[in-house]
Image: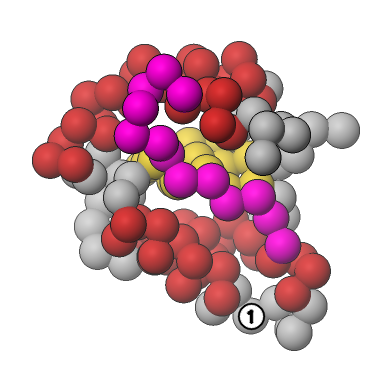
Amino acid sequence: MPLRTLVVVNPASRSGATGRRWPRVEPRLRDALGALDVAFTRGPRDAERIAREAVRAGVERLIVAGGDGTTSEVISGLLGADLGGDLGKAAMSLSAYPRHRATAAGASAPGSG
């Protein structure tokens, strides 16, 4: 059974480059991973909220399309998800969006490291 996947996209990262490139990256991720949901950040701390709500809702894999700040917020959201001390529920694949577009889907493919 495929993992329930959410991509947290910060379209403002890298001076807006992530938002401009997302339409080309999304289909490659879907081809590599299958079904996935996408959530766009709209401001500070939004990635933290999205990640916290996602793990509480049962998302098993988060992919971050953004920079260091977005990744940090997602990790904070996971740590603040209040899962009753069951860290096993928070154990998920967390991948950062690579800078090189050519490797975007391959870097996130299951079993690729």
Of residues 43 and 109, which is closer to you in this image? 109
Q: Examine the structure image and report whether residue 105 is included in the region drawn in magenta.
A: no
Q: Is residue 108 left or right of residue 49?
A: right
Instruction: Read off the magenta span.
Output: 91-103
Q: Circle 1 is placed at which residue position? A: 82
Provide residue 7's location: percent of width, then percent of height.
50, 40
22 up-or-down from 59: above or below: above
**The quadrant where residue 19 appears:** top left
Provide residue 67's location: percent of width, then percent of height.
30, 50
20 up-or-down from 108: above or below: above
Image quarter where the C terminus lies is top right
Q: Residue, x 74% and y 75% (percent of image)?
A: 87
How crowded is the residue under tag 1: few (<14 C-alpha within 10 Å), some, or many (20+)? some
Q: Residue, x 22% and y 45% (percent of image)?
A: 13
Q: Amino acid at mark 1?
A: Asp
52 up-or-down from 100: above or below: below
Provide residue 44's location: percent of width, then percent of height.
24, 64
Q: Residue furthest right?
A: 1
1 up-or-down from 8: above or below: above
